[in-house]
Image: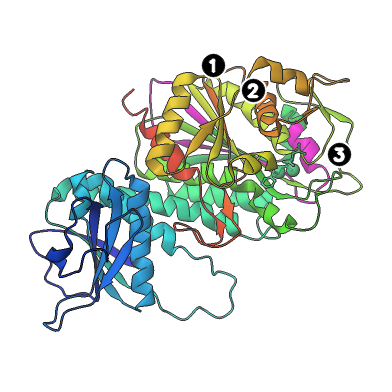
Amino acid sequence: MNIHLNVSKNSFKKTELVGLFFFDGSFTASAHGLDKNKFNAKCGEAFLVPASSKGGETTFLLGLGKQEKSTLQGVRRSAARFLAQAKTMKAKTVRLNIDGALEKYSAEEVIGAVVEGLRLSNYQFTKYKSKPAPATGVESVEIFSKKADAKSAAIAFKEAEIIAQGVYFTRDIANEPPNVMTPAYLANAAKSMAAKNNLTCKVLGLAEIKRLGMGGVLGVSVGSANEPRFVILENKVKSSQKPIVLVGKGVTFDTGGISIKPSNDMDKMKFDMCGAAAVMGAMKVIANLKLPVKVIGITPLVENMPGGKAQRPGDIIRCLNGKTVEVLNTDAEGRLILADALAYAKRFNPRVLVDIATLTGACSATFSNLAIGLMSTDEELTKRIEDAGNKTGERCWELPLWDEYFDLIKATYADIQNISKKYAGTITAGMFLKEFADHTKTWAHLDIAGTAWNESGPQPLSPIGATGVGVRLFVELVKSYKGK
Ligand code: BES
Ligand code: MG
Ligand code: ZN
């Protein structure tokens, strides 16, 4: 699908469908030859006006709701709604006029949101379908504005396409089946992505992981025939500032290990590498946008399997920073590999350290798919992440890391245990990670267990499968450090 921008006084080319944005309050039905009550520009409302006999264009009215309450997420969803309508009509060539949204937002914001809405909703993962799906797709979307500034609009448009490509990369690797997407395969995917996107990439193998003493990565991966990898991506920015370090959980398949999961829905645990995939996708975007901020992405990659060599409940391991962990449940494996990755980050002396992981079922029980669980040791970083979440629609909600919660993970025979003594599953996982991020004052943990994929049905901005959550959030977060 081709998307192009047309900022000019007129769009001459006739299309099969034209979209128009309206806020509730600035829409007058009579101006469109409509009766009142047919369309009120409520948020998410849409109304099709057939072409008149005089040979006009079929028009789709898109409601954004009241200006005070509307968000860019509404614009993204309306753009997706528009594309869905075009597909229903089997239209090939369509135009989306954005000027109605400029009453509240800048043209740059709207162009970004519209491109994201179109691209994110149009994604498909069809690599393993033997017969290609019948081509009902839209071929060309013109984003039209009379009011925008042509130069800054073009920049916003290009940026949004780069961001969408990053989300597509993340979704593509996360949707791969787990027999293909092993730790070694994912490390190679990172390597070839880095080579094409002006990033450096270092991959540590089993020998190096052993030599460094990454007891968490080793413990989780020891039961698998697929050896672990540890990937470090870095953009080529020269900066006097200390780097931002992003860490992503990369469990390419989580059976639970000896504490094995029920077989129902176990297939979904191929998505247990979505944190790593988000970091990789974000690094790709950060490099292509040439953001002038030093960023390093760290992803520990393992497969969590049962077997004769697998770690047992009761095992005690020693992580990279020397702390010992009693592994009471081998299914709480994400925190074990993140422990080593967070400790490894120390060598970069980070200014900001953020990890992202499909870490706890409890997080999706708390928020469903509506928020990322956020835990942090720094108020300012919390605020930045919340702001980035509100802007991108990848909303984050804070949970507390009170000292009292540490009692729940104090171990009998080691320093810490990897599960809570009682409840607070998401927070105690955060408390566990905090023990390994203690070298950096400004740290945050993001639990994307509820948001990393959808399984119940297609969402407005994502079909079934990996959502790519975290990519746009990280890009927005890194942008907030530009020039600071
Ligand atoms: N990958 C899972 C978390 C998960 C479960 C994410 C379901 C999304 C959907 C993680 O490794 C895990 O198994 N966590 C356990 C921890 C428990 C044993 C303390 C969980 O949440 O049940
Ligand atoms: Mg697990
Ligand atoms: Zn897991």
Residues at marks 2 and 3, CA–CA distance in whole angstroms:
23 Å
Specify the quarter for ligand 2: top right
Residue range in magenta is 216-245
- Is residue 358 left or right of 141 when viewed as pictured? right
Residue 84 placement: quadrant: bottom left
Residue at the disc numbered 2: 434
Q: Could you tell which of marks 1 and 3 lies nearer the N-terminus?
A: 3
- Is residue 251 left or right of 415 when viewed as pictured? left
Is residue 219 found inside the magenta-colored segment of the image? yes
Residue 298 placement: quadrant: top right
Q: Which residue of the protein is positioned furthest toward the right in this rendering? A: 308
Residues at marks 2 and 1, CA–CA distance in whole angstroms:
10 Å
Residue at the disc numbered 3: 311
The residue lying at 51 percent from left, 29 percent from top is 245
Is residue 165 found inside the magenta-colored segment of the image? no
Q: Residues within 10 Å of mark 1 (few under 14, many from 20)?
A: some
Residue 117 placement: quadrant: bottom left
Q: Could you tell which of marks 2 and 3 lies nearer the N-terminus?
A: 3
Kindly identify the amino acid type of the residue bearing the numbered disc 2: Lys
